[in-house]
Image: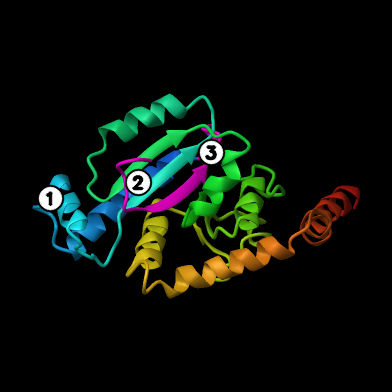
Amino acid sequence: MVGISPCNYILSITSWTPDEDFGILLEAAVMYDRRVAAILDEDNSTKEDLWKEMQNGKQDLYPRLLFIITGKGPEKEKYEEKIRRLRLKRVAFRTMWLSAEDYPLLLGSADLGVCLHTSSSGLDLPMKVVDMFGCGLPVCAVSYSCIKELVKVEKNGLLFSSSSELADELVDLFKGFPDVCDTLKLLRNGALETGSSARWASEWEENAKPLIFEVISKSVS
């Protein structure tokens, strides 16, 4: 990550498959870049100008965002090519594959996690979010039927149904970073609390077991 600071690190763990629409994250990143440029009247500034200003100590209302994307899958190359074609001033992307030892270190150093997981059955919960909470990392996740069992809105994360909603959340969460980010700090505290209290047995009893029993009872009746 040499040469890309100062940034806020946003981590997304993806399988690079059609089940996880990575296009939502790309579109949200473009929207964040354009909205911040408009707010700060940077439309005529170059990327190099902005970097020089930041290196000289200029403090902006909105930070640069670095999206770190981990995982392997069939659509990785397609989206890497789309990323290379982007011309963004305040957003950058890095894709990588992490060892088991480095994975929790990156989770712990990120500022926000993004989960693109959806469930065709409407029953499964993303283990990547459990990993994020275990490292005290708040999450913005795609909304679907049972995700609220894990992501508690405005407590340990936020939900979104479109790229525009995710872009809105990024703008709101990182405004004034690092000094004036009350919502992000609140979500981080909630993620820490969730991570410290969550245990596989309790997660099973509270989340998975009731859903499975509900499906079984419906199929029997």
- The residue labelled by disc 1 is 49
User: If you read the primary sequence from the N terminus, does the residue marked by circle 3 or circle 2 appear first?
Assistant: 3
User: If you read the primary sequence from the N terminus, does the residue marked by circle 1 or circle 3 appear first?
Assistant: 3
Q: Which mark is residue 14?
A: 3
- The residue labelled by disc 2 is 27
Question: Is residue 18 found inside the magenta-colored segment of the image?
Answer: yes
Residue 43, how many percent across, how many down?
Answer: 12, 54
Give me the residue at 41% from left, 40% from top. 23
- Category of crowding for the residue at label 2, using alpha-carbon neighbours closer than 10 angstroms: few (below 14), some (14–19), many (at least 20): some
Residue 63, how many percent across, how many down?
Answer: 30, 59
Pair 3/2: label in front: 3
Extent of the magenta region: 1-20
User: If you read the primary sequence from the N terminus, does the residue marked by circle 2 or circle 1 appear first?
Assistant: 2
Front residue of 59 and 45? 59
Front residue of 121 and 178? 178
Quadrant assignment for the N terminus: top left
Residue 100, how many percent across, how many down?
Answer: 63, 36
| Three-letter amino acid code of the residue under disc 1 | Asp
Q: Is residue 97 above or below residue 141?
A: above
Q: Is residue 30 above or below residue 101?
A: below
Give me the residue at 30% from left, 42% from top. 3
